[in-house]
Image (cartoon, rainbow, N blue to C red):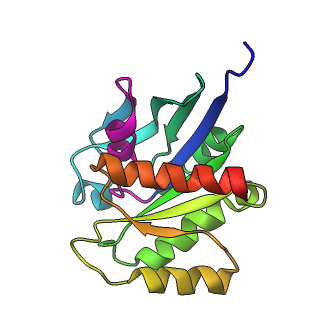
Amino acid sequence: MTGFIQTKIVFTGCVGAGKTTAITTISEKAPVSTEVKPSEASVIKRKATTTVAMDYGELSLEGGGVLYLYGTPGQRRFDFMSDILTKGALGLIVLIDNTHENPLDEMDYYLNLNYRFLLKNPAVIGITHYDETMQPSVDDYYSALAERGDPWPVIHVDARSLEDVRLLLNTLLAILEYG
């Protein structure tokens, strides 16, 4: 099919950051989710279910294309899924729960985990739960990124908000289109 574009975007980040919620919010089809009751004590105290393989959703693009949305598990024992899911992806959305014990370390961890992918592909950092605590601030995230030498935009978002998730995706797509 001429003009039919298929693109893949991956959502990654810590447990409870809103990856499943963001994909559910924006997907036009019922998302596929592998949510189960967590077995790790650190996860149990944060949420009732957690992703163990991936999340998947779809969003139509102008011109007949489809944006495939994948979400990685947040538990570290499933980190290997990042390499699998980013194969063939165009970009990465890193969601960080600002109420996490050390969210800047979490951002650093997920950027390091995806280092090879990010050598050739862009990312956008989405800060969730910012309404619960504004510390660290968006400026703190930019400072941490500057120390790393990473140019990625930082946006505080509510993963339940269609407009906020669209903003993340449109920012990433703009980087892909305009560099």
Q: In which quarter of the image is residue 119?
A: bottom right
Q: Give the range drawn in magenta.
A: 14-32
Q: Where 10 sits versus 28, above or below?
A: below
Q: Where 137 sits versus 161, above or below?
A: below
- Please say whether residue 74 is visible from this viewpoint: no
- Please say whether residue 136 is visible from this viewpoint: yes
In this view, the residue in front, 127 or 5, is 5
Q: Is residue 130 magenta?
A: no
Q: Quadrant of the C terminus?
A: bottom right
Q: Where 158 sits versus 134, above or below?
A: above
In this view, the residue in front, 106 or 98, is 98
The image shows residue 47 at horizontal and vertical percentages of 23, 52
In this view, the residue in front, 102 or 30, is 30
The image shows residue 96 at horizontal and vertical percentages of 42, 65
Q: Does the magenta stretch include residue 31?
A: yes
The image shows residue 83 at horizontal and vertical percentages of 66, 46
Residue under the image location 67 percent in, 58 percent down? 122
The image shows residue 159 at horizontal and vertical percentages of 32, 52
Q: In the rendered view, does 9 fall on the left or right side of 99? A: right
Q: How many labels does the image show?
A: 0
Q: Quadrant of the N terminus?
A: top right
